[in-house]
Image: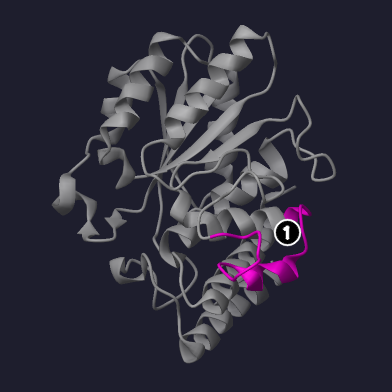
Amino acid sequence: MNNLDLAKTANEVRKGIVTAVHSAKAGHPGGSLSCADLMTFLYFEEMNIDPKDPKKADRDRFVLSKGHCAPALYSVLAHRGYFPVEELTTLRKLGSHLQGHPCMQHTPGVDMSSGSLGQGISVATGMALSAKLSNESYRVYTLLGDGEIAEGQVWEAAMFAGHKKLDNLVVIVDNNGLQIDGKIEDVCNPYPIDKKFEAFNFHVINIDAHDFDQIRAAFNEAKQTKGMPTAIIMKSLKGKGVSFMEGQAGWHGKAPNDEQYEIAMKDLEKVGEALCQK
């Protein structure tokens, strides 16, 4: 897909996120919206996957380490064809396969159940090591929140991945600067994030999370990097695309009411209209 098509698709993914969280009357819109461009690129451009065969042996794996941002994963999976987009309105409802956090037993396309922060990168590291030991060609991607990296287990996994030279592993950090309690630098400052991953023997790339040229270049560079894992630190905007959510920590974990939902969808419709004029 070209950048314009990716941007249009990401905007539809954002509509799905807002619709799902509004319907559930609960969820995490802010961090889901900030990673929508990245998720769109992974599932529509980067990863070797097949919605018709979600468990194919040689597929690339993705682990949403920041599992509370399941609305972003569900929306991109739905738009990619793993299940009907209409099912997004069943998020967190009784009997739905779209739980509040990803569940690999029930949702097509989910490679790992997640939600306990810090654990996803450990699982992804294990998957990457398994591929190496089995001489498999698949690559493993995992997305972490910047607040999440305060978890010690993150750095245990990073130390292991660097030591094992897992060049089939790409760790992405969604650096939107905000977590549930406010600015990450005030809660437990993780900066400089890039230098920390470099210290654990990662190849590190810093990008703008909303620039598809930079996203594409970063993943191409990761593929060409041998002998060490890659960490992509992407500077993003929490609540991206929805005027009243952008840059607001308060929208980390709450749902828009009916009036706010209408405003949010109008915001995203305007984005879509502008993209169609390009």
- Determine if residue 168 is in view: no
x%, y% of residue 106?
67, 50
**Relative height, residue 13 to residue 128 (above, below):** below
**What x and y, as percent, mark residue 184?**
23, 51
Q: Residue at x 73, y 66 (%)?
A: 85
- The residue that mark 1 highlights is 79
Q: Nearer the viewer, residue 46 or 140?
A: 140
Is residue 205 inside the magenta stretch?
no
Residue 274's spot in the image, x, y percent?
A: 63, 73
Q: Left or right? Give the position of 192 relative to 58.
A: left
Residue displayed at 43% across by 28% down: 122
> Would you say residue 128 is visible in this rendering?
yes
What's drawn in magenta, residue-wise? 80-99
Task: Give the residue type that dot 1 points to.
Answer: His
As drawn, is 238 to the left or to the right of 104? left
* As drawn, 82 above or below 126: below
Which residue is found at the position 54% from the left and 74% from the top? 24
Q: Residue at x 63, y 16 (%)?
A: 131
- Which corner quadrant of the image does residue 273 belong to? bottom right
